[in-house]
Image (cartoon, rainbow, N blue to C red):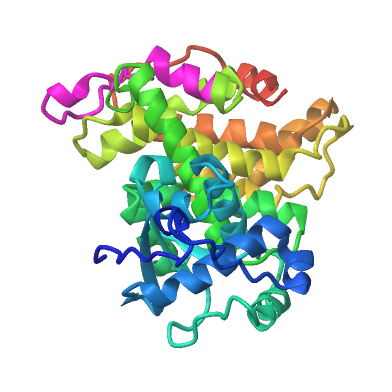
Amino acid sequence: MQSSTKFSHPGAPNSLMSSLIPEPALVISPHLAATIGLEEAALLSYLGSARHHLQGKTSQGFLWFQLEASTLLQHLPFWCATDIQRVLESLRDKGILLVGSPPLEEAGHLVFAFNQGASIPPSPVAARQPIGSAERRANTLAANWQPDETTLTLLAQRGVPRSFCLDQVAEFAHYWHERGEARHAWGNRFVTHVLREWRQFEQQQIQHHQLNVDQEEENQPALLADNWTPSADALEILEQHAEIPRTFIFEAIPEFVLYWREKGERSNTWNARFINHIKRQWTRYRHALENDNEPRPIAANWKPHPEVFDILSLAHIDTGFAQDRVKEFVIYWLDRKEARPSWNSLFIQHIKQQWQKAHQHPGMQSTRERSILDALTDRSWAD
């Protein structure tokens, strides 16, 4: 992005000292202000005027401009940098503005584009049509929503790894799909969500002495040990910050170890991988089983919830392996005639235990010593 060309209103502070002519007023459409907010309309009007004094650069189908923070504060003296950033985020969330720079106080400048074709920048006076178009584009988020390349590129420019962005998609899509709210520019909302998660992750790295590598960064990448367990810091993030039950976390350790030992891959970020693994599983588990808490006997024709197989797939367990064991699971519990609150969670537990048993190498010690009946009847991790 090329440096911005600063512009001065005839009535900027220096000229006011030698002239009684007032500085030009911001032209704000009453209809626009009623639609998007007075502060938003004021800032949009200013940026619409400012673009005529700036040299834009076309990138990814948008015409981008850069303004120094000092210029913004000079021409908008009724706001501080925090105020301007707040209004910028509001315009971005409404799908009106694209922002390609860090927060104003951090970057010292603003990189922005109007959310429409680069060849038709909005007029600060007649801004009704772009807003109306944005309103007509409001829609709910699909369950299988994925961010586009422009969104991922914007996040990459902010220093967020692509893999981290993609790890946030499932949780983001599930949350907003369940809410069923119509919104503008889901890509912009996803950017805000990912940046918040990334800042928290970076803070956790600092607070916990580079948790994501668990001090392994100083060492050469290594195979995962068969007795590997997550660090205390990793458990703290999953339990306290992500609010995932400890028993759920520990149930997932054997499958994680088994999968990566069989792949034979070397890494020095096993704790970070485990954190992402558990978060993905917990999101799907909570969605599939959150309404499955009424105790009842198992039905003779019982079938697992379709998302159960998705959860097992996230645990790297073959779907066919699980499907082949549905019948024996039903027969076992029909014979016991017990009422249980969550047959899906018991089935997940059963399959994980069976998968570990079937694939455990000779001589490898199990991470837990208990019978199949204990494994099947213990659902404390699902409470």
Tell me if 85 is positioned left or right of 69 in this view: right
Q: Using the image as rendered, state which of residue 50 and residue 20 is in the foreground.
A: 20
On-image quarter of the C terminus: top right
Residue 229 seen = no
Front-most of 223 and 302? 223
Given residues 343 and 165, the one toward you in this image is 165
Question: Which quarter of the rendering shows the N terminus?
Answer: bottom left
Q: Mark yes or no: residue 344 visible.
A: yes
Q: Does the magenta stretch include residue 129?
A: no
Task: Give the left or right position of residue 208, taking residue 19 as reference.
Answer: left
Residue 212, by quadrant, is: top left
Residue at 28 percent of width and 20 percent of height: 214
Q: How far from the left and from the top, in percent, is residue 241? A: 55, 24
Instruction: Name the spot of residue 149 as percent of width and height, x first.
Output: 40, 68
Residue at image location 54% in from the left, 65% down from the top: 21
Q: Give the range drawn in magenta.
A: 214-239
